[in-house]
Image (cartoon, rainbow, N blue to C red):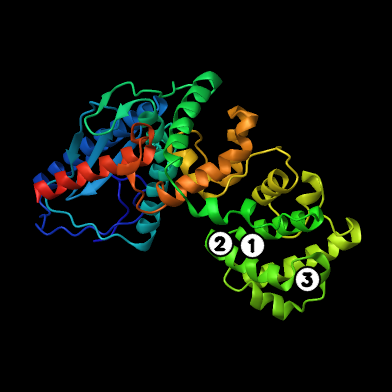
Amino acid sequence: MEKQSKYFNKSLVKKIQIKYEDGLNDSPSSVSRMQAQNAEVNSNHSQNRDTQKSYEQNGCAWKSDVNDGRVKKEKTEEGGKNEGFRLPSGRVKLEQSGEEEEGKKGQVEKQHNDKVHPVKQPNKRRKKNDYGADRKTFESERMYKLRDGYDGINGQMGIIKGAQEKSENNEELKKEHFLLTYNKIKEMRKEIVAPVDKYGCHMLGERTGDLKTYRFQTLISCLLSSRTKDEVTATVMDKLKKHGLTVENILNTPEEELRKMIYGVGFYNVKAKQILHICRILKEKYNSDIPNNYDELIKLPGIGEKIAQLVLQIALNKHEGIAVDIHVHRIANRLNWVYTKDELSTQVKLKNYVQKELWSELNTLLVGFGQVICKGKKPICEKCTLTNHCQYYKDSLVRKVKQKKGNGDN
């Protein structure tokens, strides 16, 4: 039997096929009973529509479910209860047509649009600490704590002799700390004969009556010393002086021969070209002499901040800055004089509070100390009197304690 349904919303179900499995008889009593049930269902359906309208006017959602012959109405407000009614007796199978599927799809889309989606919570990412996210910045923060008296072994705060206060702007405390540690280095250096004392750039120029030649040789020795051990620099300078280390002789020397003579220094191929270029500039612009000021020196090929300051101090007796190489940079950071990542930054910060009369001697003093005691790798800390002020020593103690604890746990 196929007929239009009286009991369902047309937008939801337009066409259904009802199959009565029980087999209703045609007796008058059963017909009247069927009519009474239909009237009751029609009454409930009209009441259902009125309730749906009132829900929608109040901003509530209405949901109808068809399952096992039941139609349910549900109020989506919190605490709402489900009410329902049954179809006439007898099992009813609903076979939905293609139109019914389209109706359901439209209703699902409407319910999805009417649905209130919860607000998406932002990702709870870990905020950066005051010291930043990268490890280097974390290490610098830890260095501040240890500098100010933090004992990394037992976690207690204490005051270390000569330590600075937290404020970096307190120049007086910085000067006091610098002088304390610098004077101790001076005392240790009295008993140390370092390679720089014998083979430093200040020892390699020929002190003759010709000052031009002396200044030129000092310039060349400083250039060759970059990234080169002092002993090697001295050996190469001896070869050049035997050959005749003057502007005219170098200009008459082929580049290949000059390259062989300076073989052994760092970047000798590049430096051979730089030496020839410098000699041409000196002959054309400075009458085979070197420039007498910083601004002109720094323009020469291969001459950087450190070399320029060394040449000014040694050859011209001018003290306009501090010559900072890898040894000075390393020691200054280990003793908490500065907190820098490169040599140029170290030079600028040291210049702010180190007395000018110490500028020229500081390089030779610290280079010798770094060559013998405060080495880049495996420093001889047991011979140093500055362990109470040394950042490297504190960090190494912390590492040793952690290693012992780790070995004990294993």
Indicate which disc residue 228 carries: 2
Q: Secondary structure at mark 1?
A: helix
Mark 1 belongs to which amino acid? Leu
Residue displayed at 65% across by 75% down:
261
- Label 3 Cα neighbours within 10 Å, binned few <14 / some 14-19 / many ≥20: some
31 sits left or right of 56 in the view: left
Above/below status of 175 relative to 114: above
- Label 1 Cα neighbours within 10 Å, binned few <14 / some 14-19 / many ≥20: many
Alpha-carbon span between mark 2 and mark 3: 21 Å
Q: Secondary structure at mark 3?
A: helix
> Sequence order check: which comes first, mark 3 or mark 1?
1
Kindly check if marks 2 and 1 are in contact, taking CB atoms under 8 A apart as contact: yes
335 sits left or right of 79 in the view: right
- Label 2 Cα neighbours within 10 Å, binned few <14 / some 14-19 / many ≥20: some
Indicate which disc residue 224 carries: 1
Mark 3 belongs to which amino acid? Ile
Indicate which disc residue 197 carries: none
Residue displayed at 9% across by 57% down:
22
Indicate which disc residue 250 carries: 3
